Amino acid sequence: MCLWVPERPHYLDELIRLEGCGRAHHACHACGDSDAPYRCEDCFLVNLFCSSCIITLHQNVLLHQVKRWQDGYFHSTTLKQLGLRIQLGDHTEQLCRNPKPARDNDYVIIDVHGIHEVALNFCDCANAPSHYRQLLRRRLFPATSTDPRTAATFAVLEHFHLLSFESKVSAYEFYHSLACRSDNTGIVPIKVSSLNQSVRLT
Ligand SMILES: [Zn+2]
Ligand SMILES: [Zn+2]
Ligand SMILES: [Zn+2]
């Protein structure tokens, strides 16, 4: 503590710096495009990117939270709003000839870092497995086996399993903490069910 106390202002400076753009210019870190307002909260890089490059960066990390720099601060947005689609089945979105969007283009995935609204395509090609099987093959546990619109990652299920043994956390408390991680203001309702109900846990 004696070593740290004199450094406290610098720690505070760095934390506040992360709330803004730092020295980043508003040019895309990847392609140099001048319109680059997006930053990922979960990636190692804290640089700004254009919408195209931030989508490219997240082709295989689909459940990150992104923010948009606007009017002097970062606003929450989603990879779904930026156009990222998750394609299930044994091929990518480009190769699947019969991608079938989830009903109403409305799908929720619960992960360790939060609850994500995503744009998800099932594969509707001949001989494609059922929708819940397609989810299970990508380590997503569907909320129901009939027309699932919510799934939990295997990672979040294992995380809760361990926490329930080690800390006796309840499912309600665990879910509530994930909802807060997604939006700690309570302003944005967090979807929780395949019935398109928005429930705020208060
Ligand atoms: Zn770019
Ligand atoms: Zn990311
Ligand atoms: Zn297909």
Image: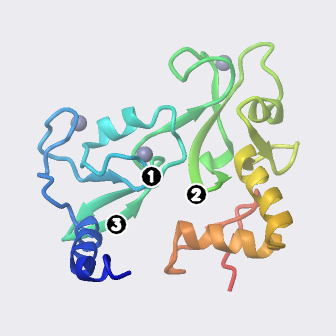
Q: Residue furthest front?
A: 2
> Label 2 sits on what residue type?
His
The residue under label 1 is 42
- In whole angstroms, how far apart are the C-alphas of marks 1 and 2? 9 Å
The residue under label 3 is 75
The residue under label 2 is 113
**For mark 2, does the 10 Å Cα neighbourhood hold few (<14), some (14 to 19), or many (20 or more) residues?**
some
Sequence-first disc among 2 and 3: 3
Query: Toward the viewer: 164 or 198?
Result: 164
> Label 1 sits on what residue type?
Asp
Label 1–label 2 contact, CB within 8 A: yes
Image location of residue 70, percent across then percent down: 23, 65
Seen at 12% across and 57% down, the residue is 23
Query: Toward the viewer: 189 or 158?
Result: 158
> Label 3 sits on what residue type?
His
Seen at 46% across and 39% down, the residue is 84
Image location of residue 167, percent across then percent down: 79, 71
Q: Is mark 1 within 8 Å of ligand 2?
A: yes
Query: Toward the viewer: 40 or 93?
Result: 40
Image quarter of residue 12: bottom left
Seen at 82% across and 36% down, the residue is 132
Sequence-first disc among 1 and 2: 1
